[in-house]
Image: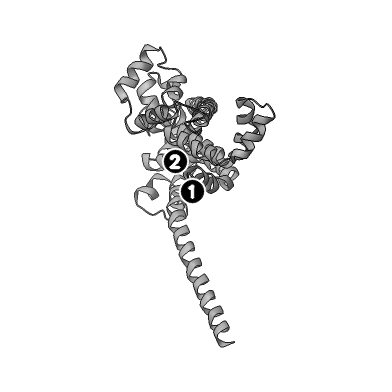
Amino acid sequence: MFSIHDHSIKSRIADIIIWVLVLTLTLSCLIPLMNLVAISFSDNAAASANMVSIYPVHFTLSSYDKLLSDSQFWRSFLISVERVVLGLFVNMALMILAAYPLSKSSKQFRAQKVYMNLVIFAMLFSGGLIPTFMVVKELNLLDSIWALILPGAVPIGNVILLMNAFRGVPKSLEEAATIDGASQWRILSTIFVPVVLPTLATVMLFTIVGHWNDYFGALVYINKASNYPLQTYIQQLSVDLQNITDPQKLIEYSKISNRTLNAAKIVVSTLPLLLIYPFMQKYFVTGIVVGSVKE
């Protein structure tokens, strides 16, 4: 009885230690974010004096008013949404079509090793920024949404994740479908895709985050500022009081600085991803494990 009781005490102590560590790590991640949000709602004087901790000081919405009142903000926001939607469709279609044949054995797909070597080579050695820019320019894609989508249309890392997930699908399912006369298209759409749904959801999350957060692509391929996606637009935005003639606006914008505005930029640009992530979180860990292990 003493040993059981002693074991129970040790187990409780271990649980307490684990919870303390988890809470400490959680706070270490949350406190910087809370500080960032607090700065975005604080005025220039408080932020410059480093008076802001996790609560706003001299609460003001001036940074968000500056950010959201600009018509270009909403135009750039819609461009980013369009990029995510189109990019997600193109990326997922091409990645699935690339990963499915590569998941087959060399007996089923004779050129599998050749294409696999090309895929690995493309992952290790890219064409480079200047050659890619020249190709985009020759195809007359500059200043178009496709210049932001097509250069990265087939992320090799995600293709390998999907390929390994497809390889984990039981062969008996494919054999049974083949005996029933199903085509490869039907086998892919009705068997393989539903089975690897967690990995697909994970790759979708990677794709959405990649398209939404990218700002450098527009700096290279987009010449008109009016065609900038959201991340590129907010990277260029800064506080400039010289061109403001309205006295009321001048007083309001004097409460903000580039520091408070940058904090508001991060909050606004991160919010859509925070709304999407909870719906895909349950697939995330499973999808990574399934897609990274080759049997």
Residue 93 place in picture, x, y as percent: 54, 26
Q: Describe the element under mark 1 as helix, strand or loop.
A: loop
Camera-nearest residue between 52 and 278: 278
Is tag 2's residue or tag 1's residue first in the polypeptide sequence?
Answer: 1
Task: Report the residue marked by disc 1.
Answer: 59
The relative height of residue 194 versus residue 229 in the rendered view (above or below) is: below
Camera-nearest residue between 48 and 272: 272
Residue 170 place in picture, x, y as percent: 59, 41
The amino acid marked with disc number 1 is Phe
Q: Nearer the viewer, mark 2 or mark 1?
A: 2
Residue plotted at (39% across, 44% down): 44
Q: Describe the element under mark 2 as helix, strand or loop.
A: helix
Q: Which mark is residue 165?
A: none
Residue plotted at (63% across, 30% down): 187
The amino acid marked with disc number 2 is Ile
Which residue occupies the extreme right position in the image? Answer: 180
Please tell me how crowded label 2 is: few (under 14), some (14-19), or many (20+) other residues with Cα within 10 Å: some
The relative height of residue 103 versus residue 137 in the rendered view (above or below) is: below
Camera-nearest residue between 55 and 177: 177
Please tell me how crowded label 1 is: few (under 14), some (14-19), or many (20+) other residues with Cα within 10 Å: some
The relative height of residue 20 versus residue 208 in the rendered view (above or below) is: below
**Figure quadrant of residue 227:** top left
Residue plotted at (36% across, 16% down): 135
- Display colour scheme: one colour
Q: Would residue 51 be visible to someone looking at this image? A: yes
Label 2 with label 1: CB-CB less than 8 Å: no
Q: Which mark is residue 266?
A: 2
Residue 223 place in picture, x, y as percent: 37, 18
Residue plotted at (48% across, 26% down): 76
Q: Quadrant of the N terminus?
A: bottom right
- Mark 2–mark 1 Cα distance, whole angstroms, equals 18 Å
